[in-house]
Amino acid sequence: MSADNSCADVSVPLRNLLNSVQCVRDRVKDGESNESNGVFNLSNFWDTLMQAVKAASQEATKLSLAFSKPPLPTQEDGEKFAESIQKSVLALSTVYYWLPKSHGITLRRLVRDATAEVLDGIVQLVDVIVSSPLQSLSQEQLQSTGGVWSACDQFAHLPRDNRAAVLGVLASYIGVVKDAIEEMEQAQAESQDPFSDVLDDEDQDSRGNQDTYWSEEDRQLMAPCQGLMKASAACLRKLLSAVKANGNVSMPETVAQLDDLADISKEISPSVDDLVLSLYPPMDYSGVDQNACKLTLVLKKVLDIIRVSHVCLEADLNWVQFLNGALDHNLQKIKALIQGSS
């Protein structure tokens, strides 16, 4: 049999495998959990999931090695490799489906995304092998194999319950809000003209135009706007501390409350970003007013949900009330300054 015929024959099971893994991946991205009335053991789930992840990584490595140098595997060997990969992929996706929503939507999203990333990596690896001359180990095949390993390795770092999952997403939101606050503070501190580092030489003469820098009136308005941003960061930090101290995953009701807190808090950082963007010159006061109101509304919704959740103990009501007052104070000041400038 010629090398070309051998290449064509062995590619048939690989192409079938590629289509199959793509279908499994798409179902994982869109599918629902298998809710059941049986007892679910989270610890057993993680043990079984980690075994399935390890098996998928090993099978992907075997496949890559088999096609890393001549001679090519026979069609029969190719079918065996494809069958082994297929089994490991189905096992991984099946274990993922075991995780019920009642153990946390936030946790389940993270496991789903990690599972889909492994399947994406296997799809890419098989596609590279099918598309390459199948004569030697290419850089692209090396990278694809490493991509599968990296995707599998991240499972060791996933949160093990919904409380840990929510803490992780809250920490990420805090980071985004902190970056926005620092960006605005840096822009104010560095120069009277926040665009001085991006204007061309021929544009320097236009910098006398207030379209490129903040007026004194603008700067007065920025102070309470920054107060809202800092209240946003404080709200997220306090919430993270409350979840860390009081978060409960022993009952479906408290698990669902943690999901609600994560979902509503997700709205904070985009609202902070919108307010920051509206503060750059030329400052549109109506836009600032609109974005300040939107951020305040989002934060008040978050505080309302915190207040009635299990993570908010009696002692926490003090900071919830304090932040509510800070929001009212800053928003009133913003509106007063805007009205005074008109």
Image (spheres, grey):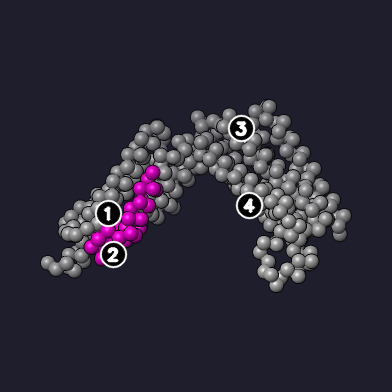
Q: Position of residue 36 (x, y in %)?
A: 41, 38
Sequence-earlier tag: 3 or 2? 2
Query: Which numbered disc, 1 or 4, marks the residue that appears first in the sequence?
Result: 1
Q: Nearer the viewer, residue 118 or 72?
A: 72
Q: Which residues are magenta?
A: 124-153
Of pointers 1 and 3, the one earlier in the residue sequence: 1
Check disc 1 and report the residue beneath it.
Answer: 64
Q: Which residue is at a point 63% across and 38% down the rendered structure image?
A: 237
Q: Is residue 54 above or below residue 67?
A: above
3 and 4 marks in contact (CB < 8 Å): no
**The stretch drawn in magenta includes residue 171:** no
Q: Please, what is the dominant secondary structure of the magenta stretch?
A: helix
**What residue sits right under mark 3 in the picture?**
242
Label 3 element class: helix
Mark 2 or mark 4, earlier in chain: 2
Q: What amino acid is at disc 3?
A: Ala
Disc 4: CA contacts within 10 A as few (<14), some (14-19) or many (>=20): some
